[in-house]
Image (cartoon, rainbow, N blue to C red):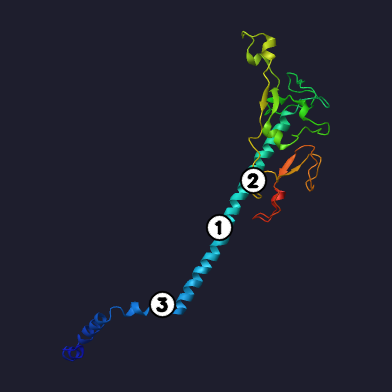
Amino acid sequence: MSSKQLKLRVAGKGFWIETIQSKIRNPKSEIQKGFTLFELIVTLSVLAILVMGTIPIAQNAVKRQREIRLRESLRMMRNAIDEFKRDTIGACPQGAITTNNPVPNSGGGAGGGAADPRSRVVIDDCKIFDTENLDRYPPSLDVLVDGVRVRARGLNIQQRGVFDDKNATEINEEKEITKVYLREIPIDPMTGKKDTWQLRSSYQTADASSWDEVNVFDVRSGSDEEALNGEKYSDW
């Protein structure tokens, strides 16, 4: 008996029976149809737009991480330079070439000026200072890594205790120690090298094209690229 005959004999249910039978006869009709060429082109176009949109975001994320490392490296080196400068107050009179520490107990000395409370030692190696380096900034970044000989600043006998077994002479005698201000010269994240840092002395302007090798007053990146904020890395 055909579906058409069922439709005639069973009034309201014939269409339902015929529809079910047609679905059963062609279960793969929709699958066999597949995607048209137009649908594939649209799908691939959408995927390409999504991929092209994520590439700049990923690149900016990597660049932002490099900028963070650059700021950290600059801050670390500048702090080391400032700390070195603080330890030179009261050290080595102008033109001195001896290693004698002329600093009295008060913390002042031939270097001039009051000592910074954050400075607990005074540099005791006058040979590292050139006669042109009147401001007593570090002669190079390597000096910060290699370290310099220092002595305790303004030793107070009362702080060590007058009732110790040692006499006054022994108390005031301090062992020579070396202070390191920088563990290592960091790599410039923008150039990938250690020797591309731009140095500037205290006698040069900010737009100086080359270092005069008198001292190290400031350090900047050697990259001429622009940051995400539009500034040049060499201006940071």
Image x and y of residue 176, in percent: 68, 21
Q: Which residue is mark 2?
A: 71
Give me the residue at 66% from left, 8% from top. Answer: 167
- Give the total number of marks visible in the rendering: 3
Q: Which residue is mark 3?
A: 35
Q: Given the image, on which type of amino acid does mark 2 rest?
A: Arg
> Answer yes or no: do the residues labelled 3 and 1 have beta carbons within 8 Å?
no
Image x and y of residue 199, in percent: 74, 43
Q: CA distance from mark 1 to mark 2?
A: 20 Å
Image x and y of residue 95, in percent: 84, 26
Q: What kind of element bears circle 2?
A: helix
Q: Given the image, on which type of amino acid does mark 3 rest?
A: Phe
Q: CA distance from mark 3 to mark 1?
A: 33 Å
Against 90, is 34 above or below? below
Against 25, is 98 above or below? above
Residue 87, quarter of the rendered image: top right
Q: What kind of element bears circle 1?
A: helix
Q: Viewed as shown, does residue 116 lie left or right of 67?
A: right
Label at residue 90: none
Q: Which residue is mark 1?
A: 58
Count neighbours of disc 2 (C-alpha within 10 A) and say few if under 14, some if 14 to 19, many if 20 or more.
some
Nearer-N-terminus badge (2/3): 3
Image x and y of residue 94, in percent: 83, 27
Give me the residue at 34% from left, 77% from top. Answer: 31
Count neighbours of disc 1 (C-alpha within 10 A) and say few if under 14, some if 14 to 19, many if 20 or more.
few
Give me the residue at 64% from left, 46% from top. Answer: 70
Q: Viewed as shown, does residue 93 lie left or right of 36?
A: right
